[in-house]
Amino acid sequence: MSCAICEVRKEKRFCPALHGRICPQCCGEQREVTLDCPSDCSYLQQARQHDKPRSRDQIGQIDPEALFLKVEVPDQFLYEREHLLMGLTFALAKAVRADRSLNDGDLIAALSALTTSYQRLVNSGLHYEQAIPSAPQQRVAAEVETMLKEYREAEQKHMGYSTVRDSDVLKALVFLVRLGYGRTSGRPKARAFVEFLVAQFPEKESSIITPQEAGSRIIVP
């Protein structure tokens, strides 16, 4: 039997995305490119064991503008604002669970648009949203904005004021953008970053994390 994709080489493995058998070469070339590989595919899992998160040198090859390198995110910030980071991560995970078609590129695009808006707000005081062309990406951005609103309201209720500044939100978003680029393989249909985020939370966990929980679950690239 020949491969269901190239129809030239001999098929040697079952592809759950196609529900057919394909050759190893097509599996490697088309995985998360033209194929919507399910997360439980054994060949995808094997590939991810070899495709470890990108190193600092590899991330350094990405367009500096995409990584918002002008925004400094000190290590101390990750601990001072761990509750905020966990809340944002939860919002992303929630968006993914609501739309299983979302991939790494969608999340990074939505985060990048939000980051651009907050960078403009922090630097110039101008507040208008960066255009997001894709409806699924718009829903991701809306989920993040909703979480930020609820987070500030929760602080206001418990402390009488909110400690989260727009500059804090900017740094948190930049951190997540860089985390996304570090986790994804960069393939068009890649979902390694998506699955990493979802794995941080059980299905019914709250977005407001207690200090004890957050202290042991800080996200690192």
Image (spheres, rainbow, N blue to C red):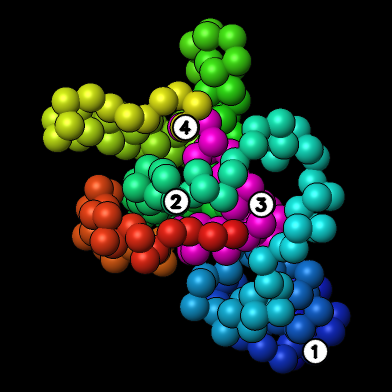
Sequence-wise first label, 2 or 3: 2
Q: Is residue 201 above or below residue 47?
A: above
**Residue 192 painted magenta:** yes
Q: Which residue is mark 2?
A: 79
Choose between 198 and 14: the one closer to the eye: 198
In the rendered image, which quarter contains the C terminus? bottom right
- In the visual, does 150 lie left or right of 29? left
Sequence-wise first label, 2 or 1: 1
Badge 3 amino acid: Tyr
Mark pair 2, 1: CA separation = 53 Å
Badge 1 amino acid: Lys
Characterize the local packing of mark 1: few (<14), some (14-19) or many (20 or more) Cα atoms within 10 angstroms: some
Mark pair 2, 4: CA separation = 12 Å
Choose between 71 and 20: the one closer to the eye: 71
Mark pair 3, 4: CA separation = 20 Å
Image coordinates for residue 79, horizontal then vertical, percent? 44, 51
Sequence-wise first label, 3 or 4: 4
User: Which of label 1 and label 4 is nearer to you?
Assistant: 4
Q: Is residue 205 above or below residue 85?
A: below
Characterize the local packing of mark 2: few (<14), some (14-19) or many (20 or more) Cα atoms within 10 angstroms: some
Q: Is residue 152 in view? A: yes
Q: Which residue is mark 4?
A: 168
Q: Which residue is mark 1?
A: 10
Sequence-wise first label, 1 or 4: 1
| Residue located at (51% from left, 72% from top) | 39
Q: Is residue 13 above or below residue 138?
A: below
**Residue 211 painted magenta:** no
Q: Which residue is mark 3?
A: 181
| Residue located at (41% from left, 25% from top) | 165
For the record, the magenta segment spans 169-197
